[in-house]
Image: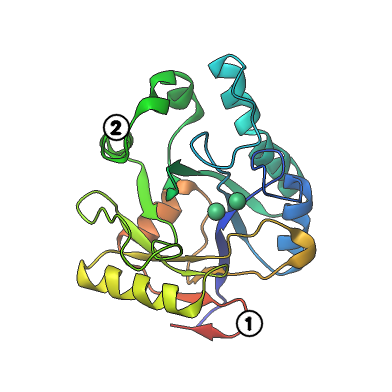
């Protein structure tokens, strides 16, 4: 078998996420140094721990939301790392990693702040977005689940206790939902590193969505450095 292509599916930047310590550029350099091919920036959206002030015009908020991605992408272009845009949409602590929503669409929908998860997912699906329930069992063993709405489940999150990841695996298996793995990195100086390693390169967000949707085989990169199926 040829080499594997390492993809980070879940990470935060200080430009977009109030809880993150590292800039997009610092994150890009750290992932390059750890041998990744592709990273997807998934800053907290406005219902979560956003770094973007609420009292600005909507379009300016969206502009600022994408700063972490844009800074990571500029650095990635220099050092040879593919950087793709994603999002971690939140509703009262329930979080959905969302891939494939264009900035122009977000700019056009300021009313989305009022949407409940079902509405958000219906509208995002009309844009062919791919929605993954992030760390579903992190806070509770009886969380709100949306198996009829989500496209996938994050079954390994480096910030989760093992038990929470095991429950997420059971959930995905029960509903035959595609799975993802990611680190939820917030600080490059405390790099854990996780993600998915595919047999084919992930050069665009559509490549990533297709690979997950079609259950393309991958190896989950665990934060202790061991690989597993
Ligand atoms: Zn966070
Ligand atoms: Zn996160």
Q: Which callout, 1 or 2, points at the residue further toward the start of the chain?
A: 2
Name of the residue lying farthest toward the top: 57
- Count every numbered label the image shows and give the total: 2
Q: Is residue 104 visible?
A: yes
For residue 127, which quarter of the picture?
Answer: top left
Q: Quadrant of residue 121?
A: top left
Asked if the residue under mark 2 is in contact with the one under mark 1, i.e. CB atoms within 8 Å, the reply is: no
**Ligand 2 under 8 Å from disc 2 Cβ:** no
Decide: is 195 above or below 61.
below
Q: Residue 160 at what x, y percent from top left?
A: 52, 70
- The residue singled out by tag 2 in the image is 123
Residue 199 horizontal side relative to residue 84, left or right: left
Who is closer to the viewer here, 192 or 76?
Answer: 192
Residue 190 percent coordinates (x, y): 75, 66
Q: Which residue sits at x=59%, y=85%?
A: 226
Q: Is residue 107 left or right of residue 56?
A: left
Could you give the CA–CA distance between mark 1 and mark 2, rounded to whole angstroms? 38 Å
How packed is label 1: few (under 14 Cα within 10 Å), some, or many (20 or more)? few
Residue at 25 percent of width and 73 percent of height: 173
Dividing the picture into quadrants, the one containing residue 66 is top right
Q: Could you tell me which secondary element the residue under label 2 belongs to?
A: helix
| Residue 160 to residue 116: above or below | below
Q: Bin the neighbour count of mark 2 within 10 Å (Cα to Cα): few under 14, some 14-19, many 20 and up.
A: some
Residue 78 visible in rendering? no
Q: Where does label 1 land, which residue?
A: 224
Expressed as whole percent of the image width and height from the top left, the position of residue 152 reads: 33, 59
Give the secondary structure at mark 1.
Answer: loop
Side of 193 relative to 1 (left or right): right
* Quadrant of the snapshot with the C terminus: bottom left
* In the foreground, 198 or 138: 138
């Amino acid at each position: 078998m040829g080499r594997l292509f390492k993809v980070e599916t879940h990470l935060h930047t200080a430009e977009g996420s109030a809880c993150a310590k590292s800039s997009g550029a610092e994150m890009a350099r750290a992932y390059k140094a750890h041998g990744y091919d592709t990273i997807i920036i998934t800053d907290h959206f406005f219902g979560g721990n956003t770094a973007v002030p609420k009292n600005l015009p909507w379009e300016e908020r969206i502009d600022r939301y994408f700063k972490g991605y844009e800074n990571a992408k500029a650095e990635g272009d220099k050092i040879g790392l593919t950087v793709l845009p994603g999002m971690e949409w939140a509703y009262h602590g329930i979080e959905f990693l969302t891939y494939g929503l264009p900035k122009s669409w977000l700019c056009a929908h300021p009313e989305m702040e009022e949407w409940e998860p079902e509405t958000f997912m219906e509208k995002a699906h009309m844009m062919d977005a791919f929605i993954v329930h992030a760390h579903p069992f992190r806070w509770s063993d009886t969380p709100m689940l949306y198996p009829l709405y989500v496209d996938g489940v994050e079954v390994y999150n480096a910030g989760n206790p093992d038990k929470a990841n095991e429950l997420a695996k059971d959930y995905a298996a029960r509903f035959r939902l595609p799975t993802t793995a990611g680190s939820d990195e917030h600080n490059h100086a405390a790099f854990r590193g996780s993600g998915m390693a595919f047999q084919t390169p992930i050069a665009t967000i559509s490549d990533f969505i297709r690979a997950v949707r079609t259950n393309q085989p991958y190896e989950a990169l665990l934060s202790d450095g061991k690989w597993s199926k």
